[in-house]
Each structure stands twice: as structure tokens, then as C-alpha cells.
């Protein structure tokens, strides 16, 4: 299955908005820490990852959380994981 | 909601002679244990540090029961059950404090499930009155907001509040060598009508012991 960057980005937006409906991606700087920008605490973040898993089938190990700091790094990480899947 | 918070906090500051104690507690061992625990588990079964910390608080309270209960009609009523009110911030502002019941009797995965359940219901406006009525102590964990130290206001009729800040990396000296470790600032707000610094100090020491031995039943 080919997953385009647009599909991944939309899956991230949908996953975050399932947990934080007011999250505004239009004004989000993709290079800033996005949990902070979008007020996601550790429960929200775990729930976002569960939503993402449902949408993309990617199970992200806790050891990789450090690679998910900004929207930009998260999209890159997901693209690489889907590429190698 | 703001009016309800204001009423409770005004009453607290008017009636409760607070004292505050704080300790830096090393959580490196607990975090490593938790990272190992989570490494083999799917997302939905992972346990957050917030749950491990809640368990540590509940178990430490067993050792200092004078912090656990309610002050009603001019006297303190100690509670056998440990129902921890967990301060939960809401999207759009405000907080609610639903209880995790019998927090000292649940296994870590059970506690995580219970915490997830009340936080989710709090944020979706589906709390029941039983969730809000009977807490015997409050825990406020502001680590996710980047706060290092919490100076909490006790929720009447309770007589104590435990505050946890964020986990931070520190250099520590162990066996004469400098090593990296992770610590959290824990604070206790106590009610001087019921306890004094001795109880608070015993609680913080018990909490430290719990974080040192995360597997203890």
C-alpha cells in the first residue's frame, strides 16, 4: 500500500482532532514542540498514538517518543516507518 | 465552574491553616522499570508515569493515615479507604477533581485503566456525582505543563494535597561519581488542625521509598 505524505498528514490531524477537537493546525508551527503547542498531556498523547495506530497501522514504541517532538519530525518518522513496513 | 473552584479555594484558605513541605525525589529506577514494562506492551496497555506516581502516593498514604480522610463538623475523620482525587484540567479552562477509588488496592494496570477512564469522562463531561464526592486526598500532577514545583491548596473537607512537578534530568553523585538521573519535585500541603510537619515528612519519605521500589506490592 502506498501512503502519500498527504495521507499521513491527514491521519495525524484527524488523530489529534479526535482527542483535541479545537487543535488548530493552520496556525501550528511544524518545527515547534507540538504537544506543548496543542496542549496535549501524556494521556492525550497516548490516545493520539492509539488513534494513529487505528488509522495507519503503525504501533509506535515508547522508546521512539523522542522522535515525535514536532509535527515535522513526526511526519518524517511515520513516513519512514510506513516505507519500511 | 470558576465560581465553584473559587468557593472551594476561598473556604480552604479561610479555614485551613496550611503547611507546605517539598522534596526532590529520584525516579530514575521507577522510570526505567516502567520503560521495561511498557516496551513489550501494545499502546492500549501501556502505563503512564502518572499512574505509577498515583500508585506510589496511594501506597505511601497507607503508612501515614492521618493525611487521608475528611475534616467534618470540627473533627478529622480518618478514612480506611484511599480515594485519590486527581486534578484534571479541561480543554477550554477549569479543572475537575474526580476520584480514583481504592487507589491503593489496584494493580498498576488496573490503576492505569481507572485513571484513563476518569480522565476521559472528565474531559467529555460525563462524570457522575459519585466521581466527585468522596475523595480522601488530592493529587495534582502538573508535570505535563512543565511545572517543577506545586504549592497546592487543599480541597476541603480533605486535609492534605500532594503535588508533583515534571520529571527533570539532574546530575547526582553516587559512590563518588557524577551520574545522570531523573528526579521529580514532590510537595505536600497539610492541614495543621490535623497533622504537622512530622506527618508530612514521613509521607514524603514513604513516597521516596515507593519510587525506589516500583515493583513492591
Image (spheres, coloured by chain):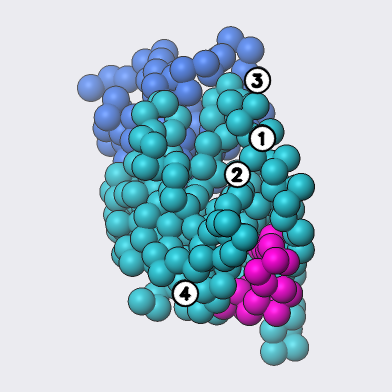
Read off the residue under disc 3: A29
Q: Residue B163, percent across and down?
A: 64, 56
What element does badge 2 sit on? helix
**Image colour assigned to chain A:** blue
Q: Is residue B187 magenta?
A: yes
Q: A24 and B107: which one is in front? A: B107
Is label 1 in contact with label 2 (beta carbons under 8 Å)?
no
Q: Which chain is cyan?
A: B
Distance CA(mark 1)–CA(mark 4): 30 Å
On the rendered structure, is A9 left or right of B113?
right
On the rendered structure, is B47 left or right of B202?
left
Question: Picture quarter containing residue B26?
Answer: bottom right
Residue drawn where x is 36% and y is 35% of the image: B128
The chain under label 4 reads B
Distance CA(mark 2)–CA(mark 4): 27 Å
Q: Which mark is residue B144?
A: 2
Q: Residue B125, percent across and down?
A: 42, 26
Distance CA(mark 1)–CA(mark 3): 39 Å
Q: B14 and B56: which one is in front? A: B14
Q: Residue A21, percent across and down?
A: 46, 17
Amino acid at each position: 500500500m502506498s501512503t502519500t505524505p498527504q495521507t499521513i498528514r491527514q491521519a495525524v490531524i484527524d488523530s489529534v482532532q479526535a482527542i483535541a477537537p479545537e487543535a488548530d493546525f493552520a496556525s501550528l508551527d511544524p518545527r515547534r514542540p507540538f504537544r506543548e503547542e496543542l496542549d496535549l498531556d501524556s494521556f492525550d498523547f497516548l490516545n493520539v498514538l492509539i488513534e494513529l495506530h487505528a488509522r495507519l497501522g503503525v504501533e509506535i514504541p515508547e522508546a521512539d517518543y523522542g522522535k515525535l517532538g514536532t509535527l515535522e519530525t513526526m511526519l518524517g518518522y511515520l513516513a519512514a516507518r510506513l516505507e519500511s513496513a | 465552574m470558576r465560581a465553584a473552584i473559587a468557593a472551594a479555594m476561598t473556604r480552604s484558605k479561610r479555614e485551613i491553616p496550611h503547611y507546605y513541605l517539598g522534596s526532590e525525589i529520584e525516579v530514575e529506577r521507577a522510570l526505567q522499570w516502567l520503560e521495561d514494562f511498557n516496551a513489550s506492551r501494545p499502546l492500549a496497555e501501556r502505563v503512564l508515569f502518572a499512574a505509577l506516581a498515583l500508585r506510589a502516593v496511594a501506597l505511601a498514604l497507607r503508612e501515614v493515615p492521618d493525611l487521608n480522610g475528611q475534616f467534618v463538623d470540627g473533627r478529622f475523620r480518618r478514612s480506611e479507604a484511599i480515594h485519590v482525587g486527581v486534578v484534571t484540567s479541561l480543554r477550554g479552562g477549569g479543572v475537575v477533581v474526580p476520584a480514583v477509588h481504592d487507589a491503593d488496592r489496584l494493580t498498576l494496570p488496573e490503576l492505569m485503566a481507572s485513571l484513563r477512564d476518569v480522565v476521559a469522562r472528565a474531559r467529555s463531561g460525563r462524570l457522575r456525582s459519585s466521581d466527585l464526592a468522596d475523595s480522601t486526598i488530592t493529587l495534582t500532577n502538573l508535570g505535563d505543563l512543565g511545572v517543577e514545583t506545586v504549592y497546592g491548596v487543599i480541597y476541603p473537607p480533605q486535609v492534605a494535597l500532594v503535588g508533583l512537578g515534571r520529571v527533570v534530568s539532574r546530575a547526582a553523585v553516587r559512590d563518588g561519581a557524577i551520574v545522570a538521573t531523573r528526579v521529580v519535585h514532590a510537595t505536600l500541603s497539610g492541614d495543621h488542625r490535623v497533622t504537622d510537619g512530622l506527618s508530612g515528612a514521613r509521607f514524603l519519605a514513604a513516597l521516596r521509598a515507593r519510587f525506589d521500589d516500583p515493583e513492591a506490592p
